[in-house]
Each structure stands twice: as structure tokens, then as C-alpha cells.
């Protein structure tokens, strides 16, 4: 019995140490649409990994926009990143884009697949195929590698409501992870969430292949 308790405690400590260097995981169980976006209800700078999917059914892929919403109550340095899982035979040419939409941002200089609210501006982060070998990194929390994507890290000074739109301009569709925030803040429910979702991620059950 003592050995089992010791092993359980050791596993918990190792898991907790892994968590403090990772993102709080969320799955796209339903489509994060313009009508029902994912809403960041906690600290906006808390590091969250949103495991999401742009559907490609051959008809509506270009219309599939994933939308995320958060509120700023004070000026914050906001971190956003989009990454794609490395899966042999898949996603080598999947380059999803994202755009930050909010008050005080600049006017768009390109055609976008969504409408910008009056008084809002946009920052578009293009995910471009440069033709060379795609840069990857290993993420120990989920136990898999990802293709790196464009990063936004700037000070947002305007208080108000912001949106993040993700889409695939090439109309391929696929799995991606949107990272919002870069501060490792963990509460009891976040740790419980990680306990539930980590095994699923390690088994690849977040993917829609």
C-alpha cells in the first residue's frame, strides 16, 4: 500500500511539474463559430492551448471560420500563436492563418473572409509556405511535435472586446492548436482539466484525421 501511495504521489508530482511548463488544454467539442465563439472567461494572459479543427468536406472548408473572444479590462501584453501537429502524410502543406480583431487596431489592407465591426481594426498573421523545410518543435506536455507558426506578442492598450479568427486560405482544412496567453497560471480546475485531456492528446484523440 505504501509503495502504491508513493508511486501515485510521484506520478502526481511529475505531472504537476510538466503542467507548470505547459498550456491549459481545451478541445473544440463544438464548432467555434461567429455565432458561438470560444470565450476566454479567465485571465486572458493565462496560457491556454485550444485544440481545434478547420473542417474540410470539399464544399464548406473555405467557410469554416473558428472564432475566439476575450475582453481586456486593462492594457496587457498579449501572446497568440498558431501551430499544426506533425503527422506523417498529413498537414505538411496545411498553413492556417489567424487575425486579431479589436479596437484601436489598423484598417485591413487585404480581403478577409469575415466582416470587421465598425470602429474595429485588424492584425493578420499570415502562415506562409516558404518552400523550404518546415521548422518544428517538440511539445512534452502532449508528447508530439508541431510545425511552428506565426506569433503575435504585442501590448494591447485599448480596453474592450477582441476576437481571433482562424481560417485556411488554401481550403485544405485540418487540425491546429491556437495558443492564447503565455503566463503559466494553474488553478485546481486547470490541473483537473489537464489530468483528463493529457492522455487523450498523447493518444492522438484530439485529431480529426
Image (spheres, rainbow, N blue to C red):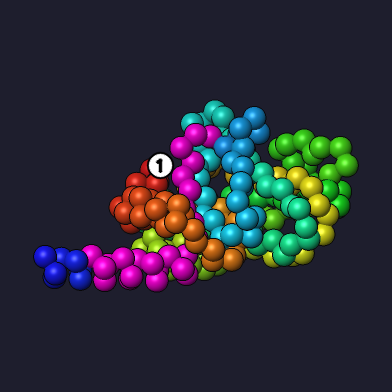
What residue lies at 77% left-to-right and 64% top-to-bottom? Answer: 155
Q: Is residue 97 left or right of residue 194?
A: right
| Residue numbers of the magenta segment | 8-31
Near-viewer residue (57 or 208): 208
Please state, as top left, top right, bottom left or bottom right, where the N terminus lies in the image: bottom left
Q: Where in the figure is residue 11, as x and y percent of width and height?
A: 27, 67
In the image, residue 149 above or below residue 118: below
Residue wearing tag 1: 208
What residue lies at 70% left-to-right and 45% top-to-bottom? Answer: 163
Near-viewer residue (141 or 116): 141
Q: Quadrant of residue 170?
A: top right
Q: Which element type, helix, strand or loop, lies under badge 1?
A: loop
What residue lies at 32% left-to-right and 54% top-to-bottom? Answer: 199
Q: Where in the figure is residue 176, as x and y percent of width and height?
A: 51, 50
Q: Where in the figure is residue 58, as x and y percent of width and height?
A: 51, 31
Q: Where in the figure is residue 111, as x and y percent of width and height?
A: 78, 42
Amino acid at each position: 500500500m505504501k509503495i502504491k501511495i508513493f508511486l501515485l504521489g510521484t506520478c502526481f508530482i511529475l505531472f504537476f511539474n510538466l503542467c507548470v511548463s505547459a498550456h491549459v488544454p481545451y478541445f473544440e467539442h463544438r464548432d467555434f463559430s461567429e455565432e458561438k465563439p470560444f470565450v476566454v472567461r479567465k485571465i486572458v494572459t493565462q496560457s491556454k492551448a485550444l485544440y481545434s479543427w478547420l473542417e474540410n468536406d470539399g464544399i464548406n472548408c473555405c467557410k469554416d471560420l473558428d472564432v475566439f473572444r476575450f475582453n481586456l479590462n486593462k492594457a496587457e501584453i498579449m501572446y497568440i500563436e498558431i501551430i499544426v501537429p506533425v503527422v506523417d502524410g498529413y498537414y505538411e502543406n496545411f498553413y492556417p492563418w489567424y487575425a486579431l480583431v479589436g479596437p484601436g487596431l489598423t484598417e485591413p489592407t487585404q480581403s478577409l473572409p469575415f466582416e470587421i465591426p465598425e470602429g474595429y481594426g485588424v492584425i493578420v498573421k499570415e502562415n506562409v509556405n516558404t518552400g523550404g523545410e518546415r521548422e518544428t518543435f517538440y511539445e512534452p506536455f502532449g508528447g508530439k511535435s508541431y510545425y511552428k507558426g506565426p506569433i503575435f506578442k504585442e501590448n494591447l492598450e485599448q480596453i474592450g472586446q477582441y476576437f481571433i479568427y482562424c481560417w485556411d486560405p488554401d481550403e485544405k482544412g485540418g487540425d491546429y492548436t491556437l495558443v492564447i496567453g503565455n503566463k503559466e497560471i494553474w488553478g485546481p480546475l486547470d490541473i483537473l482539466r489537464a489530468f483528463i485531456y493529457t492522455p487523450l492528446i498523447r493518444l492522438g484523440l484530439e485529431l480529426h484525421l
